[in-house]
Amino acid sequence: MAEETGKLEKEAPEREPEESKEETVDGAVEEDAAKEETSGKEPSEEEVSLDADGTEETSEKPQKLFGKKKEKKSDKLQEKLKELEDQRIRQLAEFENFRKRSEKEKSQMFEIGAKTVVEKILPVMDNFERGLSAIPEEEKESSFVQGMELVYKQLLTAFEELGVTPIEAVGKEFDPNLHNAVMMVDDDSLESGVVAEEMQKGYMYKESVVRHSMVKVTN
């Protein structure tokens, strides 16, 4: 009996690990079940949801970022439009200034050309005047002299249409801008500094002098 009791006591401790092993297996099964329940639980509203393609749905934060990007893009476009409008206005102003400057230069060039032509014709006018003044009174009624006078008058009319006018000199106060004094004379009938005689007629083209008048001025 004593030997059987000792065998039983030796066999009893050997069974205890099997029981603990069973408890460990049961605990592991319970933990797995808990994990499965946790994994099967539906996500809350705060969690990110997935659409049909498996991609994340747009949340409020990306929407705000997208709106800000859109506003920045709109502001950049407005700035670009304003810059282009300023450039257009400046170009129009530059073109207008260029047009006015070109017209002024063209007008000046035309005036220079016209003055050059008038200067070339003035000696012809001088010869007409000298020739007509040298004709005797008895020959002034001849057809030849009358034809010469008609040509002279035609030249004067053409000059007037072009803006060429003779400078008034005799009896006028001497003006160095219009007159060229070549001699000083004594004349009691005229005040000092007055043109007493015109030796060569001067002409103006519009507002500029083509040729100064050659005059005699009283002392």
Image (cartoon, rainbow, N blue to C red):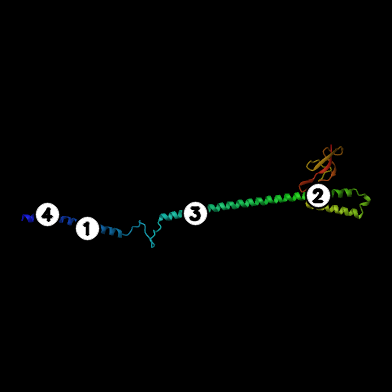
Q: Earlier in the sequence, mark 4 or mark 1?
A: 4
SS class, disc 2: helix
Residue 105's spot in the image, x, y percent? 71, 49
N-term-proximal mark, 1 vs 3: 1
Q: Residue at x 80, y 50 (%)?
A: 118
Foreground disc of the pair 4, 1: 4
Q: Which is more N-terminal, label 1 or label 2?
A: 1
User: What label sits on residue 25 in the rendered view?
Assistant: 1
Mark 1 crowdedness (10 Å alpha carbons): few <14, some 14-19, many ≥20: few
> Which label lies toward us, 3 or 2?
2
The one nearer the camera, 135 or 52, is: 52
Q: Which amino acid does label 3 sit on?
A: Lys
Residue, disc 2:
120
Quadrant of image for the N terminus? bottom left
The mark lying in front, picked from 4 and 2, is: 4
Measured Cα–Cα span from mark 3 to mark 2: 70 Å
The kind of secondary structure element at disc 1 is helix
Q: Is residue 91 left or right of residue 24?
A: right
* Circle 1: residue type: Val
Q: Which amino acid does label 4 sit on?
A: Lys
Quarter of the rendering containing residue 35: bottom left
